[in-house]
Every structure is written in C-alpha cells, then in structure tokens.
Image (cartoon, rainbow, N blue to C red):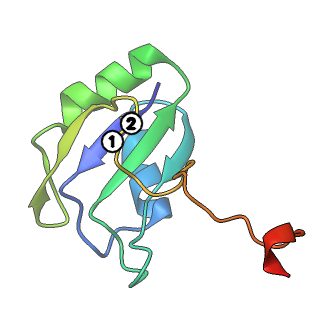
Amino acid sequence: MSIYVGNLSYDVTQDSLTAVFAEYGTVKRVQIPTDRETGRLRGFAFVEMDSEAEETAAIDALDGAEWMGRDLKVNKARPKEDRGGSFGGNRGGGGGGGGYNRNRY
C-alpha cells in the first residue's frame, strides 16, 4: 500500500519528502507526479514505506501538519480509478479499400 500526500509545496523534492517520512520508518519509494505539458509538480506525491505500521504512524503524525508553509493532507492512497470515456480502445469504423471490384469495368 502507499500513502497519498497532498497540498505539497511546488518546491518539494524527493529527498526532502523522503527525509520527513523517514522519521516514521523506512521509506521504500517516493513518487512526485509532474504535469505532462508543463513539467511542473502537481502538488501531491505518493510514499511507500516498509510496513503498514510505519505508514499508519506517518499518516497519524503528518496529516494536517504544516510543512513548507502548507497544511499537508496525508492518508492511505486509494487504487487508481478507471475513469472510462478515455481515448483508445476499439472505436469501430474504419474503411476497407483496395481489392478487386468487378463492377469497376
């Protein structure tokens, strides 16, 4: 499982976030998503820790805490939802083309 960390400063780094969570246990991974178009941080991150007990301790201590001038929102990450209606998949349609047409001559 992982932890969702929201309302982050846009100046946060992977190292600084790791250091904060390391006070509550072993940090296995930190992921800070960026905007695809601008490359700017999106203001949230995901942190994975070594055990559920460590995750719970970090959530209890850091949810609502002020860090880098912002009040953090820290909770268990929910699985990614299938939003539907996205692009891709089989859209049907398409055209044939080519081949012999005996009615042509």
Q: Considering the numbered disc 1 on the image, is that residue within a helix, a strand or a loop?
A: loop
Frontmost residue, 76 versus 37 = 37
Nearer to the camera, 5 or 91: 91
Q: Position of residue 65 (x, y in %)?
A: 12, 45
Question: Mark 1 to mark 2: distance in Å?
Answer: 4 Å
* Left/right of residue 18 with respect to residue 35 in the rendered view: right
Q: Secondary structure at mark 2?
A: loop
Total labels drawn: 2
Residue under the point 38% across and 73% down? 35
Residue labelled with disc 2 = 82
Q: In the drawing, does residue 16 fall left or right of residue 50?
A: left
For label 2, the crowd category at 10 Å Cα-Cα, with few meaning under 14, some 14 to 19 and many 20 or more, is: few
Asked if residue 95 lies left or right of residue 42, the reply is right
Per the rendering, the mark at residue 23 is none
Report the residue marked by disc 1: 83
Badge 1: few (under 14), some or many (20 or more) residues near its Cα, within 10 Å?
few
- Where is residue 80, by image quadrant? top left
